[in-house]
Image (cartoon, helix red, strand yellow):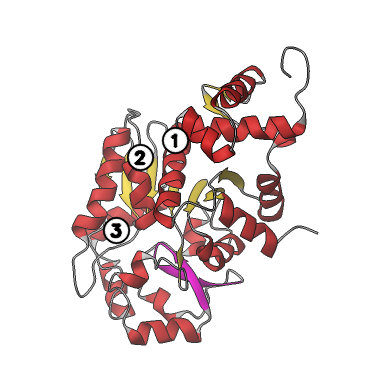
Amino acid sequence: MQNGIEMPRSRHSEALRAAQMYYLQDLTMDAIARELRTSRSTVSRLLSSARESGLVQIQIRSPLDSAPELERMIRNHYGVDVHVVPVLDTLNEAETLDRVATQAAKTIGPLVDSNAIIGVAWGATISAVSRHLTRKITHGSTIVQLNGAGNMQTTGITYASDIMRRFGIAFGARVEQFPVPAFFDHASTKTAMWNERSVQRVLDLQARMSIAIFGVGSVHSDYPSHVYAGGYLDETDLNLLASSDVVGDVATVFFRADGSSDGITLNERSTGPSHEQLRQVRRRICVVSGASKINGLRGALEAKLATDLILDEATAKRLVSFGSPS
């Protein structure tokens, strides 16, 4: 309520959108006014309404009884907590990713406590998130890399370690890298390596994760995911994925549109955690930017890989159009 009077639903929604842009995306009131096609004074009143009505208290919340329709529909259909980032269609893919990454970083921060083991999967989206993290000192926490990053062209150490390092600095946490390739050439090599004590130490940390943070790789997205564009897969691998009807991956473990992953032979050589293992993690935060990743996102949600989903508005609309609850 505002001054004892309940706000109309439309104004409640406008106030929430303005608050998200201002507090979570760091936009100025002038920038918000341009995006909402209104005046700066109106934006100021919307922000005041958001504070007075309880939408804004230290951090932004979206009460279930007044959540935006997209969040409500996705939550009901897929059983995940949802944060939809309002982004206009006029923004390009890089600008959209930056907006999503900014809000994701601020959403993740309050969820990280001391003595946490936080699993992080490398990728373009999570790399962007890592650049927007703000410092929150914790004690006894560990950042553990979820999947190897090496391939035939590069060790991948610099790329992955930069992401892990930024997470470690943000939360004052110890960083444990995973110095293995993204994919072994042979499943038997992976089996042998998994018996090594140095590798088992990292696997043990992964098995005790309290939070997992990851993006979604999608085979046919407009902006190819790093695993598909970074030299990790050769033509034979891509043909195997196509013959298995693969639509995407999480931490280099692949799945089909229905969420299934059985019989996908490349997973036997992948160094990422199995879907069964990932589903054991109490909090699993998935960050997605770009509507062209919709097939990969749908597959990940069907596989029940996420408990929390942060995505841009256009992708949320496509997700709802594909899977609206009846």
Distance from Cα at disc 3 to Cα at disc 2: 31 Å
Q: Is residue 158 above or below residue 221?
A: above
Q: Which mark is residue 106?
A: 1
Give the class, few, some or many, for how many residues have Cα within 10 Å of label 1's Cα (few <14, many ≥20).
some
Residue placed under numbered mark 2 in the picture:
132
Check if residue 252 falls in the magenta segment.
Answer: yes
Residue placed under numbered mark 3 in the picture:
200
Q: Is residue 106 left or right of residue 176?
A: right
The region drawn magenta spans: 246-257
Image quadrant assignment for residue 136: top left
**CB under 8 Å between callouts 2 and 1?**
yes
Report the amino acid beneath label 1.
Lys
Q: Residue at image x 78%, y 21%?
A: 6
Secondary structure, mark 1, is helix
Report the amino acid beneath label 2.
His
Camera-nearest residue between 209 and 326: 326
Distance from Cα at disc 2 to Cα at disc 1: 8 Å
N-terminal of the pair, mark 2 or mark 1, is: 1
Report the amino acid beneath label 3.
Gln
**CB under 8 Å between callouts 3 and 2?**
no
Q: Which mark is residue 213?
A: none
Give the class, few, some or many, for how many residues have Cα within 10 Å of label 2's Cα (few <14, many ≥20).
some
x and y percentages locating residue 278 in the rendered image: 48, 57
Q: Residue at image x 37%, y 82%?
A: 237
Q: Residue at image x 28%, y 66%?
A: 195
Quadrant, the N terminus? top right
Query: Extreme right residue here?
Result: 326
Secondary structure, mark 3, is helix
N-terminal of the pair, mark 3 or mark 2, is: 2
